[in-house]
Each structure stands twice: as structure tokens, then as C-alpha cells.
Image (cartoon, rainbow, N blue to C red):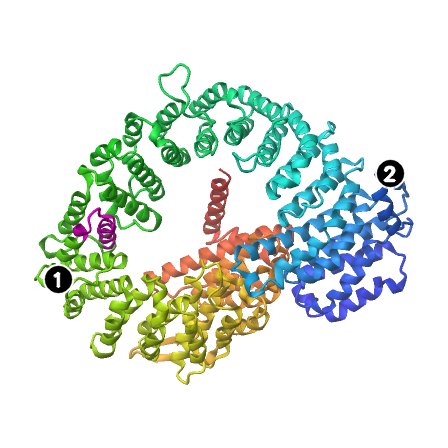
Amino acid sequence: GYRLGKQLELVVPLVLGQCAPASQSSDAEMIESCLQAFDSFLLRCPREVVTYEADIAKTTLHYLKYDPNYADDDEEMEDDVADDDEDMDDDDDDGGEYSDDDDVSWKVRRAAAKVLSAIIVSRPHRLVELVPQLAPELISRFKEREENVKMDVFATFNELLVQVGHARSVETHNSDAMSVEGEAAEGGLSAAAALLSEVPRLIKALGRQLHERSVKTRVACFHTLRQLVQSLPGCLSEHAAAVVPGLDKALKDANSNNLRIEALAFLQLALASHPPTVFQPHVPSLLPVVLALVNDRYYKMTAEALRVCSGFVKVLRPAPPAEDFDFKPQLPALFSTVKARLLAQDQDQEVKECAITCIGLLISHFGDACASELPSTLPLLIERLRNEITRVTTVKTFAALASSSVDTGLNSSLSGSSGTVLQAVVAELASFLRKSNRPLRQATLSALDVMFRAHGARLAPADYEVVLLEMPPLVADSDLHMAHLALVLATTTVTTNAVATVPRLVDKVQPKALLLLQSALLQGQPLRSLLSYLAALVAVDAPLLNFEVLTGQLLKLADGGSAAGGSALSRHALEALSQAVAVCCSAAPQPAQSSQMVSSFVAQLSAKEAAPRRVFALYCLGEIGAKNDLAKVGGLVDSIMGSFSSASEEEKTAASFALGSIAAGNLPHFLPRLLTEIQTSRYEYLLLYALKDMVSRSRQAALSGYAQQMLPCLFAFSERDEEGVRNVAAECLGKLAVVAPDVIQALEQQLQHANPLARSVAVNSVRFVITESADSTSPVISATSINRFLSALGDSDLKVRRGALLSLNCVARNRPSALRDSLLELLPKLYAETLKNPELVHQVDLGPFKHTVDDGLELRKAAFECMDTLLETCLERLNLADLLSHLARGLSDDHDVKLLCHLMLCKLAAGTTQVAVVVASLDSLVEPLRATITEKLKDNAVKQQVDRHEELVRSALRAIRVLEKMSEAEPCPKMEELVRTYLKTGKLADKYAAVIAEEKAKTAEADA
């Protein structure tokens, strides 16, 4: 493909001339060969064939209907079928009986379908054009008389559905209130809209095919329907009635298990992806058929039918306890059928788990309507809870019962026991907490949290005790997610029954929580859960663990780390401890308690305490001040700024953090003073960092009122030579723009600034605008403004262009829809930055030797990182052939760039839609990979160089392994020679074998 591509402009016109419809050629084998050539051109020479795509598509669509030996009137058939399905069946059958041993025209139609598939797979960026062009033609060919060709037509149409679904999922996943800005005019969403307009025609054609006698055809129809519902959820809302007859017929067809399983899979997906009202009218006709399949002897059929029953439960009563639909006629048969499966012992594990899940849904939705069944059903679930095989599923089922809005009978007495069903379940769940099965412990902690939250008042102190006794081993940094779940459960027990809980926490959970608080690994959700736990203890004000006790324990930890004038605790641990002190002060029952704590910290700053204690005091003041107004504390700012003159850099940093955080707690009082100090104080850098912390921690609307006052100061810092200072200024400006949108206009004006440093700060600030507003329901910055900033990719200064690349990467990851209109203009500028510029390479004379410096390296790294992000979020808008050509050059670049390119190659090869384009470019990828793995180090190379080289070789071998697997399907002589010559034997054979073993291990782990 690589060599032929250069001659394609000579070859394609000749091939088109051989098979052009105007040539009236009757040589079917010649036409088939021409179409097969088009298939190869599209997949192996994607860039060179672009000019001829329209002609190839036109010719292919003509031959998709090529059948000179069979007369057919499309329009009459379309009209007749709507009136009489049975007559149509007979007509189709008669057509299917046509046979001619000399007729090979079906090969032409099959080849045409494969060419269309190649167009769809290799051109995802053209979906908006392809859907209206190809979908009607493919739908019209569902009536194909040759079954093998019909399967290829279905497969090609399914490829189109997959591509639209992928584009739509990317768009909706990365949506950022696109409808607000009218940004949904192009791309995946418009392709989905075009496909949606074809749904009536598609359902009509599929409805006809569902009445065919061929099982293979009907299975293909359901597969297409399933893919349609996945790609366009809710698209059958107006067409369910047209699908149900064919669905009902398939479910009753006892001659084919595959057909019924495919029909059940489609029905399950349809029920889940449409509003309940769509299928409620069809419940009386469909549910009895599904219930009959629940009793089928084939376990896969039974399991699938039970999943469909679970879907029907949500359709019958979507929002209990409301009764918007009359479900009572269907409930007895549904409940008894599923319960019979729950009772059965000799059945597959999959069936058991589906029966447990379904009965749980039935009880949680209809517990009040089937109360007479609960006394006999709940004990069955407890038995399944004690069975190791079905344990995890049953735990989740009881969690669903506990959170139900109807009475599920959990608080009823359990026969043969002195307690309730809920108490028996809690006791059983408590024993699971000591099991080694991690998923079981996770499910158990979540279920117990739901039960205590919803039914805690119905449980006895002994029920709390049996759970709390098992929790201490779980509160550890060896498994932070487990610790998070355990702390959430502990918090729930404190808020629901502090009297029964707190005495047990004192010596069981609390020591472990304090130990966890000192861990250098504690962060994110586990840290927030631990802080919530401490706040709950302070709020209930239990004598054993009240404000005084808890703060005393926390201060003791800090003092212990500060003994002998040295800090044994890491900065991370000190910050976590200070946050713990702050939440205790915020939750203190009496304001005087918090005020006294603040006064003691201020006193430590004034006294000549050891530096570690002052550092901790500053962190605590900052955390407390961010959550509480400390404006009335006298001399607070002066005391904090006094630490700016400390000899300890750590204390200076803590003082800057404290000042900014306290200012965030009361902007009107502290911000004017902070701005004044920045203008007059000699500690302007520390004050700038304080301003950054203030902007970061403040979410008050009042901040926007001070934006214009802060801009001159921040713009002045943006012209400083120190990169760290400019980065802080960019972060402040970006975060300020989120709460004060008029700042964006000022930043746009900075793009015209004569100083490139100021322009780079303006461009970099966009990253912080995007990331800080990622969770916003409406975009803070418009797509038009974003593209103004990204136009800096054409700036003459390296720093500005690098900032634009970083911003483009951020936008592509967090808000790709903003790039829809501008990506085609930005890509050439992006690709231009991937090229090595000799003018930016120079040598630095270091005396005895010279060192080569490449000033463009960071720029190229940023460009390739951006390409990597675009592959994840904007794949459907990229011309992969162009991207691969630049990626091939990157394989010969610097060490870090090569690593990025290897990673991108692996991602491209792992995808299903872009494999064909990668295969077409294999020849251009092999040589740079060979050069990487065969590169020799100098004899005097140091260990660091050796390690970096080994890392690069392993990375290249992983990429080669992925490409080798692709070349097994599409032979590539160069790749085969590379593997045979260098990797099957020789020095690299062992390393390559290790890469293959690593891949197999990962695959086995994923399957497990």
C-alpha cells in the first residue's frame, strides 16, 4: 500500500474505467476484482485515495444493486409490504427459490458491501456525509435474495451504527451544555440525527425481514436492532408496535435457541433504554412468552429471560410506591415463576444470580403488593446469602431491599429466630467483613451503610456492636477504598445511634482512624470520608469523643511529630491533621470552643515556639479560616505575615497558604489588605501565592466584584521572567475568570500584548478556566473565545505556542465540542509543531565537552501529547492517515516523544474502527521501530542512560507486539521480517518473550 500509494493517481482511473456503470461491462468477475481493488485502496492508501472517494462510492452503490438476472421493483415492494405481510413473505420465498448455477452476480454485490464497509470504518470523520448517503441504500438491500450477501449488507449497516454510536457517546460524554451555545450542529450528534431520520424506513424493512423463514436472517435483524438501540437509545419510542410482532414470533420459535437468545437480548436492551410507557402496552403479549422461557431447560435462555423479567419489573412500576400502570394482573405469574427459579438448586450459577437479582427487584418494587409472599421468600434469600457462590449478588439484593421506598418486610420477624429479618442479615453481613474476598467486603460495607441509614432506628445496640467489632482492620492505608467505605459506615452509625456506637469506636475504630490520618497515602475521597467521620463525632458531642477529646488527640499527634524541634510527620500528614482540626472547629457545638482554638494558634505564632509547631499552627489557621470568618480575631494578619521573615522556607509557604485561605473566608475584610500588601510589601511573591490560594478556595460571588482590582496586579506579574511566577499568575487569572466572566475579555486583549510573556500567560490561563468550570452546567467561556486563544498556535514565540498547545490539550480533554468548528484549521498548526526544527537545536560549550540543547523538544512533546488526547476524545473528527504520517516521524524523535508515539500506536491498534488505517501504514512504521530496538549505547554510558534505553526498547517491543498481531490478519512482509530477524532469535528474543508473557498475564487478569 505504501509503495502503490505513490502511483494511485495513475491506477485508480484505470480501475474505475473498467467497472464504470457507463461501460456496460457484463464481466462479473472483472467487476468483483475492481471492487476488491477499491477495498484495498481505501484501507491501505487512505490519504492518496481521498480524491477518488466520491467516484468509488458512487460506483460501489451502483453495484450494490447489481443483479442483471433478476427483475425487481423496489417501490412496489415497499408499498405492498405495508398492506400485507403474509403476501410479502410468499413473494420473498418465491424470490429466494430462484437459482442459476451460472449466476455469479452475487459476488459483485458482496464485494460492493465490503467496499462500503471499508469507507465507513476508515472515514469516521465523514459520518455526517456518509449516513444520509449510505443508510438508505443499505436498508433497501435488506431484501437481498442471496443470504450470504444479505449477511454482508447487515454487517456493513451495523458498522455504520457502531460508528454513529461511538461518535454520539464521545459527544454526550464530553458534552458541556452544547445546546446552550448551539454547538451541536456538526459531528456525532448530527450523524445521529441523520440516522434517526432513517429509523422509520429501517424498522419497516426489518419488520419485513423478521417474518422471513431464514433463522440466520432473523438473528441478523435482532443484532441490528440491538446495535441500533445501543447507538440511538430511545429511537423506538414511536415504532415499538412495529417491532413487537416479529419479536413475539421469534420468542415462540422453539427451533432455534440462538434466535430466541438474540431476541431476548434485544428486548432487555430496549426495555432499559426506553421510557416505561413505550413498552407498557405490550406487556400482556410479551411477558407470558418471556416467563415461558424462564422455565426453559437451556441455562443461557433462562438467564437471559430472567434479565428481561428484571427489565419488565421496572416497566410495570417505574417509581414505587406510585401506581401509574395496572400491574396487578401480571404480578402473580411473574413472582411465582421467578420464585420457582430461586427455589431450584440444580441449576447454573448464572441462573441463580439472575433469579436472586430479579426477585430482589420484584420485592423492592412490589413489596406492598405481594406482602403475603415475603415471609416465605426472604428466608430463601438469607439461605442464598449463606451460600458462598451466590453471596455477593445476594448482598447487593438486600441493599436494594433496604433502600426501597415500599415495605419490603425486612423489619418483620424471622421464623425460627428471636429477631427480625434485618437483624439476621446484619449479623450475617458482619461476618463477611473478615473474609478475604475483596468484592464481597466492598458490597457488604455499602449494604450495611444503606441498612443503617434507612433502618438504623429499628436495630438494637448489639447489632451495631457486631459490625463495629469487625471494622478496625479495614481502616488502613493498605486499601484506601475499603477504608473509605468503612469510614462512611462508621459515620452513618454515629449519626443514627451515637449512644450505642461511640463507646465502641473509642478503642476499636478511633485509634485506626488517627493512624490513617498520618499516612502519606491519604488523599481524595478517603480523606474526605475521614473528615466527615470526625465532624459527625464532634456534632453528636458524646462525652468519650467530643470536641475537647478529639482536638486533644489531633494536637498530640502534631506535637509528637514536632518533638525535639524536628518534624517526623510529612507535610502531607500535617495538612491532613490541620484539616481534621478545622472540621472539628467548624462542627463544634459551642462557638467559644472554636474561638479558643484559634486564639491558641495565634499565640503560638507570637511566642517563640519551635518552627514545626508554628508551621502546624499556620496550616490550622488557614483551614479554619477558609471555613469560618476570622475577621474579628485581632492582629491575625500581622501575626501570619510575621512568619514571612522566618528562616524556614516551610514556614513561609505555610504562612502564605494561611493568609490566602483566611482571606477566602471573608473577602470584603481581607482582600483589600492583601492587595495593598502586594503593592507595598517586599514579600510580593509570597503574597502572590496567598492571592492564588484565596482565589482557589473562594467560591463566593463577591469575588467577581474585586476582579478589576486584582487584574492590574496579576497582569504585572504575568510579565515577570520567572516561569513559576507567571504560572501562578495564569492560574489566578483563569480561576478568577470562572467567577468573573468579564476577565475573559481582558485576557483576550492580552493576546495582542507586545510582550510574549504576557501573551503566554493569557493563553495558559485558558487551561484553568476550562478545568475549574468542568462541572458547570453552562459554559463559562464560549467556543468562539476558546478558539481566539488557540489561534496563538500561530504565534512567533515558543512559549506562547507551547501554552497554546497545552491549552488545546486541556480543551480537547475537557470540552472537545468546542473544537468542532475549528479543529480542521488547528490540526495543520498542531502537526507543524511535531516537526523537528534544526534552527532550535544548538550546542552549549561546557568546557571539556559540548552539550546539544533542543529548544523545540518541549514543544514537540506538548504537540504529541495533544495528539494523544485528540485520539481519545475527537477520534471521529481526525483523518487518521494524516495523524499516522506524523506519528511515524515521531518514532524517530527524542526518547520522550518516542514513548508517546509507542503509546498512541498501541491505542490505535487496540481500537476496532481504526485498525484498517494502521494496517495500511505498517510499512512506514516498521523502519523507525527497528532503528529504536537495534540502537547501541556508547561503552561509557551511565546507569541512567542504560535504564532509559531499556525503558524505550520495552516500549517499542510492546508497540511491535500489537502491530504484529494486526499483521497476522493483514500480512506485512516488513513486519514479518522484523519479528523473524530480530525478535524470534538474537539478543532481543528474551525481552520480546517477556513482553508477550506480560500481555498474556494482563489478558488473563482482565478475563478473570
Disc number at residue 273?
A: none
Q: Residue furthest bottom?
A: 754
On the image, the x and y values in percent for residue 892 come to: 50, 67
Q: Main secondary structure of the magenta part?
A: helix
On the image, the x and y values in percent for residue 24 come to: 90, 61
On the image, the x and y values in percent for residue 870 come to: 53, 62
Q: What element carries label 2?
A: helix
Q: Residue furthest top?
A: 416
Q: Is mark 1 on a helix, strand or loop?
A: helix
Quarter of the figure that contains the N terminus: bottom right
On the image, the x and y values in percent for residue 579 come to: 25, 53
Residue 320 in sight from this viewpoint: yes
Residue placed at 64% from the left, 54% from the top? 163
Tell me if residue 576 is in the magenta stretch: yes
Image quarter of residue 50: bottom right
- Left or right, 740 with respect to 236, comes to left
Q: In this view, does 219 lie above or below 167?
A: above
Nearer to me, 951 or 769: 769
Tell me if residue 239 is in the magenta stretch: no
Image quarter of residue 693: bottom left
Q: In this view, does 967 lie above or below 83?
A: below
The amino acid marked with disc number 2 is Asp
Q: Which of marks 2 and 1 is nearer the N terminus?
A: 2
Nearer to me, 653 or 598: 598
Per the image, the residue denoted by label 1 is 605
Per the image, the residue denoted by label 2 is 93
- Left or right, 222 with respect to 1006, comes to right
The amino acid marked with disc number 1 is Leu
Disc 2 residue crowd, few under 14, some 14–19, many 20+, Cα 10 Å: some
Q: Please give the range of residues in magenta.
A: 575-594
Q: Distance between the residues labelled 2 and 1?
A: 93 Å
